[in-house]
């Protein structure tokens, strides 16, 4: 995924093999936001990934998984300076 739309001009090999990428990139980049940079970023990503897996594998319903992830994330973030 290019960081800027102008990078598509340099993705000639990719676009030749996968012409649908232009549409995908244009659709995604207009809504893209950088991730916040926090010291516990990887730990928070792991919490969210676990929540998503617990729902997709049928171990939890979405609201329960999100509530548990929020509690864990808040605990992690409360330890940040």
Image: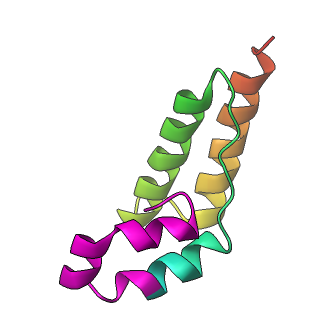
2 horizontally vs 63: left or right: left
Farthest left residue? 17
Question: Residue 46's spot in the image, x, y percent?
Answer: 48, 37
Dominant secondary structure, magenta: helix
Quadrant placement of the N terminus? bottom left
Q: Residue 78: name its quadrant.
A: top right
**Which region is colored magenta?**
1-22
Q: Left of 25 or right of it: where is 78?
A: right
- In the picture shown, does residue 72 fall above or below 34? above
Name the outermost residue toward the top: 81
User: Looking at the image, which is closer to me, 43 or 64?
Assistant: 43
What residue do we see at 81% from left, 11% from top?
81
Q: Where is residue 17 in the image (x, y as percent from the top left)?
A: 18, 81
Tell me what residue is drawn at x 33 percent, y 69 percent: 11
User: In the image, 35: left or right of 52?
Assistant: right
Residue 73's place in the image compared with 28, above or below, is above
Q: Report the front residue among 79 and 37.
A: 37
Residue 66 is inside the magenta segment: no
Seen at 68% across and 24% down, the residue is 76
């Amino acid at each position: 995924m290019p960081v800027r739309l102008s990078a598509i001009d340099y993705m000639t090999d990719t676009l030749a093999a996968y012409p649908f990428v232009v549409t995908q990139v244009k659709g995604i980049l207009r809504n893209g936001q950088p991730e916040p940079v926090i010291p516990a970023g990887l730990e928070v990503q792991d919490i969210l990934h676990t929540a998503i897996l617990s729902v997709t594998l049928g171990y939890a319903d979405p609201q329960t998984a999100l509530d548990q992830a929020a509690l864990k994330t808040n605990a992690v973030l409360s330890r940040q300076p």
